[in-house]
Image (tube, rainbow, N blue to C red):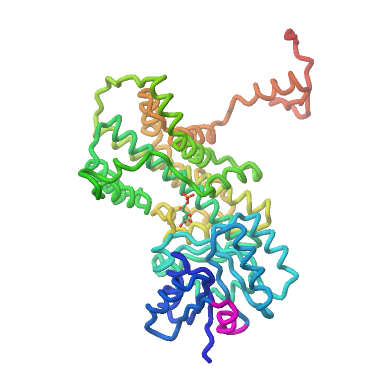
């Protein structure tokens, strides 16, 4: 009996599409899912004997070449552990098991450690690009066992997205590096999505623009330096008709954003690796505030909005808004990449930031023209502390600064919340402030807790008996 080179466990949307993608590239692949409806549906699509879907685990395991290459596309969390345990009685020497869900990096690290004494190799691999990516080419972020990666790399190089002929996959680093990079990807995804929603808010409420005008604006931006998947789909959203009534669908969608947690994970670990990511934090908080709809409805009555009397010059606003969005994009990537650099050091991942920028250029949700420049920046200087220090990005931010400040001021003066745009601006302003008022914080700490401070005119550690007048 002919054996298959790869096996996929979990034939839901991602697994079902991935199996077809692998197959399209000439690799033989078997799939396994307990749900016979899914396996029957896939087998019905079969036009070659290069793939087959099984609903029996022993038959599936037996259908694979040894050592086996098994890809898990099952929901992150407990299910991954359950599946690994189910595989145990069947696995053989040097089998490779690759978890491709959105697993928390600490779960991946735990599994790497727990399975390190076993005869198999375990890897964590982030995949971005949703259904279309799984089917036609995603950005693939593998990490962990290098030997195992070398074995599956030819297949990954074939099935991933390509930019200028280069594959959007590369080995990300040790341990849970693949899932860590994917987590930060999602943090950036949250931040950019929030920023785009704020631009929409400004255009709709402050600029009094119609959906058609908003669509044209995003579309025009997508043809310039802001070219990116998220700007592209945001433009498209504004011309989708409502299938249940007249007008555009976007106006009928309830204003509460859901989340599965990956953005919040990024915020949670940023503190552990001492990496400020305020735009991502703001995006996570804003999804939560959006979901507090009932409270917002009550508060809206208690704090009525002031009517804006400002006559807005639309053309000028849009020019400034483009610059503010562009600056925030730079800041979002700056924060994400700096977090990856810190985490790489803290967790000994050995991540190459230029490889990350390279594989995020295509296939993934945060793909953007700007990543070409970010890749160049890290290729020039692998130790670059922050992309805002790179000459190109510093120049771009300087040129956009006046517009960036103006947009945030106008929004706040009008009472329009812009947490992502404003925290990006605050981060940028703080980052290039040669002096910050933290001397007062040190004085306060020393005042109430004798925590000591350092001086700016001599070496040493100091404590003062402050002129205590407070009882
Ligand atoms: C991707 C996405 C994907 C993620 C969704 C939903 O890269 O393809 O990041 O992995 O699951 O974007 O995330 P939320 O439900 O948390 O918005």
Looking at the picture, does residue 370 appear above or below residue 15?
A: above
In the rendered image, the quadrant that contains the C terminus is top right
Q: Position of residue 133 (x, y in %)?
A: 42, 64
Q: Is residue 317 left or right of residue 94?
A: left
Looking at the picture, does residue 233 appear above or below residue 254?
A: below
Is residue 58 on the magenta stretch?
Answer: yes
Q: Position of residue 413 (x, y in %)?
A: 38, 23
Q: Position of residue 68 (x, y in %)?
A: 60, 79
Q: Is residue 333 left or right of residue 115?
A: left
Image label count: 0
Residue 390 appears in the picture as rendered: no
Looking at the picture, does residue 107 appear above or below residue 225?
A: below
Residue 230 appears in the picture as rendered: yes
Tell me which segment is drawn in magenta.
Answer: 56-66
Outermost residue, bottom side = 1
Outermost residue, left side = 246
Taking depth in this image into account, of 64 and 214 the one nearest to the observer is 64
Q: Residue at x 42, y 25 (%)?
A: 298
Is residue 357 on the magenta stretch?
Answer: no
Taking depth in this image into account, of 172 and 352 the one nearest to the observer is 172
Q: Residue at x 43, y 34 (%)?
A: 293
Outermost residue, top side = 469
Q: Position of residue 229 (x, y in %)?
A: 37, 54
Q: Residue at x 44, y 58 (%)?
A: 364
Taking depth in this image into account, of 9 and 105 the one nearest to the observer is 9
């Amino acid at each position: 009996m002919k054996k298959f080179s790869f096996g996929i466990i979990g034939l839901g949307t991602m697994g079902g599409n991935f199996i077809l993608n692998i197959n399209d590239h000439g690799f033989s692949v078997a799939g396994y899912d307990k749900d016979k409806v899914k396996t029957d549906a896939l087998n019905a699509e079969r036009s070659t004997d290069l793939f087959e879907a099984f609903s029996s685990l022993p038959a599936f395991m037996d259908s694979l070449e040894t050592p086996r290459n098994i890809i898990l596309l099952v929901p992150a969390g407990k299910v991954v552990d359950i599946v690994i345990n189910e595989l145990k009685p069947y696995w053989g020497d040097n089998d490779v098991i690759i978890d491709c869900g959105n697993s928390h990096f600490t779960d991946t690290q735990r599994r790497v450690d727990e399975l390190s004494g076993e005869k198999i190799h375990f890897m964590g691999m982030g995949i971005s690009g949703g259904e279309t990516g799984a089917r036609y080419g995603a950005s693939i972020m593998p990490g962990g066992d290098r030997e195992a990666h070398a074995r599956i790399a030819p297949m990954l190089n074939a099935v991933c997205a390509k930019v200028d002929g280069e594959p959007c996959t590369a080995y990300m680093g040790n341990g849970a590096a693949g899932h860590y990079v994917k987590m930060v990807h999602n943090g950036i995804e949250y931040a950019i999505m929030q920023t785009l929603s704020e631009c929409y808010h400004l255009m709709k409420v402050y600029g009094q623009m119609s959906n058609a005008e908003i669509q044209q604006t995003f579309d025009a931006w997508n043809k310039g330096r802001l070219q990116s998947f998220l700007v592209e789909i945001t433009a498209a959203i504004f011309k989708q008709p409502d299938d249940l009534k007249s007008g555009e669908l976007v106006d009928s969608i309830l204003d509460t954003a859901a989340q599965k947690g990956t953005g919040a994970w990024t915020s949670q670990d940023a503190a552990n690796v001492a990496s400020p990511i305020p735009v991502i934090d703001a995006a996570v908080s804003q999804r939560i505030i959006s979901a507090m709809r009932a409270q917002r409805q009550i508060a809206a009555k208690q704090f009525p909005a002031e009517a804006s009397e400002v006559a807005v010059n639309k053309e000028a606003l849009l020019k400034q808004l483009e610059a503010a969005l562009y600056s925030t994009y730079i800041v979002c990537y700056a924060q994400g990449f700096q977090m990856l650099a810190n985490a790489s050091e803290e967790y000994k991942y050995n991540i190459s930031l230029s490889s990350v920028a390279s594989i995020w250029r295509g296939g993934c949700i945060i793909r953007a023209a700007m990543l070409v420049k970010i890749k160049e920046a890290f290729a020039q200087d692998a130790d670059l502390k922050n992309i805002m220090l790179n000459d190109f990005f510093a120049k771009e931010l300087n040129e956009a600064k006046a517009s960036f400040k103006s947009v945030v001021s106008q929004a706040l003066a009008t009472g329009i919340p812009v947490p992502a745009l404003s925290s990006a601006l605050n981060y940028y302003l703080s980052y290039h402030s040669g002096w910050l008022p933290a001397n007062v914080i040190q004085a306060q700490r020393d005042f109430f807790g004798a925590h000591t401070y350092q001086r700016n005119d001599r070496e040493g550690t100091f404590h003062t008996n402050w002129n205590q007048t407070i009882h």
